[in-house]
Image (cartoon, rainbow, N blue to C red):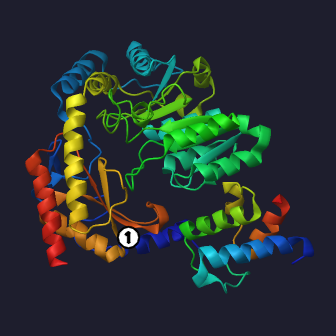
Amino acid sequence: MSLFDKFQPLAEAQASLGGQSPAAIATPIEAVLSPTRGIIDGREVLLAGTNNYLGLTYDPEVLAAASEALTSLGSGTTGSRMANGSYQTHRALEQELAAAFGWTSAMVFSTGYQANLGTLSALAGKGDYLLIDADSHASIYDGARLSHAETIRFRHNDPDNLDRRLQRLGENASRALVVVEGLYSMLGDRPPLEAFVEVKERHGAWLLVDEAHSFGVLGERGLGLTESAGLLDRVDFVLGTFSKSLAGIGGFCVSPHPQLQLMRLACRPYIFTASPSPATIAGTRAALRRVLHGQDLRAQLQRNFSRLYAAAAELGYRLGSDVPGPVAALLLDEREEALALWRGLLEAGVYANLMIPPATPSGLNLLRLSLSAAHSDQDVDRIIAALAELTVSA
Amino acid sequence: MTTDHQEPTRQAIRAALARALPEHRDLDWSQSLTSEAGLDSVQIMNLVMEIEDELDLSVPVDVLAEVNTLDELAVRLSQLT
């Protein structure tokens, strides 16, 4: 018996993908040249498997702000927000995030994963309830495990199913935090948010929307699904990440409830970790300004994903979402089929993501394409041409 | 050990099994759901959701981590009802 025995099924799953280079999981990217170009296996490829939805990783203002902060404030804070790592710029970013939503409170975390881990575990304690969508991201499941709350799953995107679970809680529903995502990263689908809001209000529960993949993408000012659905005054918490549209690394929680500030005193993944580096914070502040005035970027992104969705459907691919969005998940019956499509696309010079269980919902095998505002019409043409070619040869 | 008060729970599990995993309807109730019966986490989750609807109760996620077989699930769920 060995401590490592438990990893054997994972080793077998990895082996089932074959030993061919480059590896389909954790594919080495040898160099990144721009938001849409990189070097894989010695060749320049079109990047269609990132979360760089607005293409801001090389935005001149983002780079200039990060460079200036790196030089003036140093490479790291060397401590936590509670100790020596709380800089004026961390506070400034929190104020800017809260102001963007028109709310009172915001907290910045060192990663998006920690934003969920910290917020869920701090808000929902012993005697409280967490009601989470069955297709929730791992950070939501892990946040639930770290909390001492009773965690109950409801069926994916099913407000009636949530309704029944809140009904069973009776008066305790006032101690229940419901968690949904603005855009699910695997299938690219969205929740019926207004119906969820109606259910949570009827039971007096609380609602948190994780806008990790929808922030920057949806809404007039890019605040996410909550903004685009006109529900900013009816949700309790919005979570987000800096590592997608904001082109950095980190996460945040914003809320109209001023008591969120108290959470700083009880939130272990916030307290016991180093705060984000000055360069990260400065780059994120610049990216946030661009996001809030990024209607041009969102228009281009929408044009790109609308074209890809239409073309993929026309070519006969099954998509994970009925509503076009920045994630286009092609559903494949067999793992081998998904792997062959992934390799075929890479050979055609297009890097996408192979997604297989247990990372995917319902045991699906997915070829996940994600688009960016930085993709040109010609880039989208090239992705579509590669998909068409692979359909013909299949 | 099966007792009478578990019977409604067992019936609900049988009905849910037939709906969620018809190919496993003859599953041995003393088998490990994962290592012996070969179910994955998604299949187990779908089965539990069917059972929840059948019994009109919500099963906390950590309860699932405690059980390995349908027999154990029946015992644990009958404590919740």
Q: In this view, does A128 lie to the left or right of A302?
A: right
> For residue B38, which quarter of the picture?
bottom right
The chain ID associated with circle 1 is A
Q: What residue is shown at x 63% (from left), y 27% (from top)?
A: A266
Where residue B8 appears, as percent x and y from the top left, is 83, 72
Residue A314 relative to residue A363: left or right: left
Q: In the image, what residue type sits under mark 1?
A: Gln
Q: Position of residue A306 (x, y in %)?
A: 23, 49
Q: Is residue A216 visible?
A: yes
Residue B11: name its quadrant: bottom right
Image quadrant containing the C terminus of chain A: bottom left
So how many labels did they put on this image? 1
Q: Is residue A124 visible?
A: no
Query: Around disc 1, counting alpha carbons within 10 Å, would you say few (fewer than 14), some (14 to 19), or many (20 or more)?
Result: some
Residue drawn at point x = 66 percent, y = 76 percent:
B17
| Residue A341 to residue A196: above or below | below
State whether residue A25 is above or below residue A76: below
Q: Nearer the viewer, residue A184 or A79?
A: A184
Percent coordinates x, y for residue A331 in the rendering: 34, 66
State left or right for residue B21 relative to residue B80: left
Query: SS of the residue at dot 1?
Result: helix
> In x, y percent, where is residue A4?
52, 67
Q: In which quarter of the image is residue A257?
A: top right
B21 relative to A307 in the view: left or right:
right
For disc 1, the marked residue is A14
Residue A16 vs A277, above or below: the answer is below
Quadrant holding the N terminus of chain A: bottom right
Q: Residue furthest right?
A: B4
Residue occupying the point 42% across, 75% down = A12
Query: Measuring 58% from the left and 84% from the top, which residue is drawn there?
Result: B23
